[in-house]
């Protein structure tokens, strides 16, 4: 796990609009779920803010802990009516997962997660098997995240641990916002596996490989290059987005109305409570600023 970067910051400063910061950066690495949409609908102001950043010279790469490859996410964004001009490219933890699995040709893989994620493995030299025949496990999520919790997986995880199987986590998020509620993600199952003594490999934020892939993608888009100190990460999660950005050496902008909305009293884009915000960031990695929702 990435170590949290300790600071003496009491609370991040309020940013009135993304226009205050955007012109200072060549590259914007923006989270998707909780910033651009909430799983049910797009946030038009956030999409417009990213479009205007591009108009003003920045490249925008959407970086998501979604367990599926970027093509699936582009299709989902189209379905949610996110304008194509919002971003230049997408990089997902699913892309990193595929890169990792491609290094293990011929592996017998046990998949934990919903059937809709099976496309993550398309075209790879793998055999999908039951748990007893597998020599590797990949978790993309819960089978039914509407009703299940990590506790429902303890018995299965214990058997996998007893066999010494490496557990690849294709989505390090613990929870994600879906409309007005939070649902568990693969990261919660991976944490449970580690608690049982198993070994987990995390493929997305806050870990380095996904940032390396995002930078490589961005450099291919920008022949003029990316100047030092001119990368900004935007996200709604302290554990993944903000701590990950700081560990990677990037600035960050925190969106308060995502997964921390309830504890910050920032539901539906309300102004976050200052004391709650100070408490969230006290002693932790901190962003350059905070907004209730992303807007220009």
Image: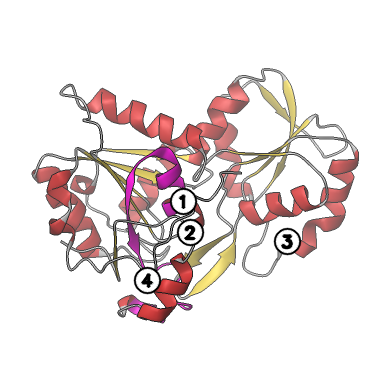
Front position in the image: 78 or 2: 2
Pointers 1 and 4 in contact (CB under 8 A)? no
Determine whether the residue tagged by mark 1 lies in a helix, strand or loop: helix
CA separation in Å, label 1 and label 3: 24 Å
Determine whether the residue tagged by mark 4 lies in a helix, strand or loop: loop
- Residue, disc 2: 284
> In the rendered image, is residue 64 in sight?
no
- Residue, disc 3: 150
- Comes first in the chain, label 1 or label 4: 1
Between circles 1 and 4, the one closer to the viewer is 1
Disc on res. 89:
none
Pointer 4 local density, CA inside 10 Å: few below 14, some 14–19, many at least 20: many
Residue ID at (36%, 69%):
11
Disc on res. 257:
4
Instruction: Say above or below: 259 vs 275.
Output: above
- Give yes or no for residue 255 being in the magenta stretch: yes
Image quarter of residue 212: top left
- Residue, disc 1: 243
Front position in the image: 184 or 286: 286
């Amino acid at each position: 796990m990435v170590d949290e970067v300790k600071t003496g910051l009491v609370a991040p400063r309020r940013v009135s609009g993304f226009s205050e910061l955007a012109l200072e950066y060549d590259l914007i690495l923006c989270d998707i779920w909780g910033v651009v949409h909430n799983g049910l609908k797009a946030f038009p102001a956030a999409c417009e803010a990213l479009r205007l950043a591009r108009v003003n010279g920045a490249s925008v790469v959407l970086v998501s802990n979604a367990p599926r490859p970027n093509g699936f996410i582009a299709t989902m964004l189209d379905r949610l009516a996110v304008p194509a001009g919002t971003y230049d490219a997408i990089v997902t933890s699913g892309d990193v997962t595929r890169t990792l699995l491609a290094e293990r040709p011929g592996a017998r893989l046990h998949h934990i997660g919903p059937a809709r994620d099976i496309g993550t493995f398309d075209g790879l030299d793998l055999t999908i098997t039951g748990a007893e025949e597998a020599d590797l496990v990949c978790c993309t999520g819960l089978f039914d995240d509407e009703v299940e919790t990590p506790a429902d997986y303890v018995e299965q995880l214990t058997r996998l641990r007893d066999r010494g199987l490496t557990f690849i986590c294709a989505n390090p998020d613990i929870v994600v916002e879906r409309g007005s509620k939070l649902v568990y993600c693969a990261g919660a199952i991976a944490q449970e596996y580690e608690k049982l003594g198993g070994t987990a490999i995390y493929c997305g934020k806050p870990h380095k490989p996904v940032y390396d892939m995002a930078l490589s993608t961005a450099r291919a888009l920008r022949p003029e290059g990316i100047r030092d100190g001119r990368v900004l990460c935007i996200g709604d999660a302290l554990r993944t987005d903000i701590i990950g950005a700081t560990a990677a050496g990037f600035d960050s902008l925190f969106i308060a109305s995502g997964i921390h909305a309830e504890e910050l009293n920032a539901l539906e884009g309300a102004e976050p409570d200052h004391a709650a915000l100070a408490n969230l960031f006290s002693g932790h990695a901190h962003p350059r600023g905070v907004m209730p929702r992303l807007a220009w």
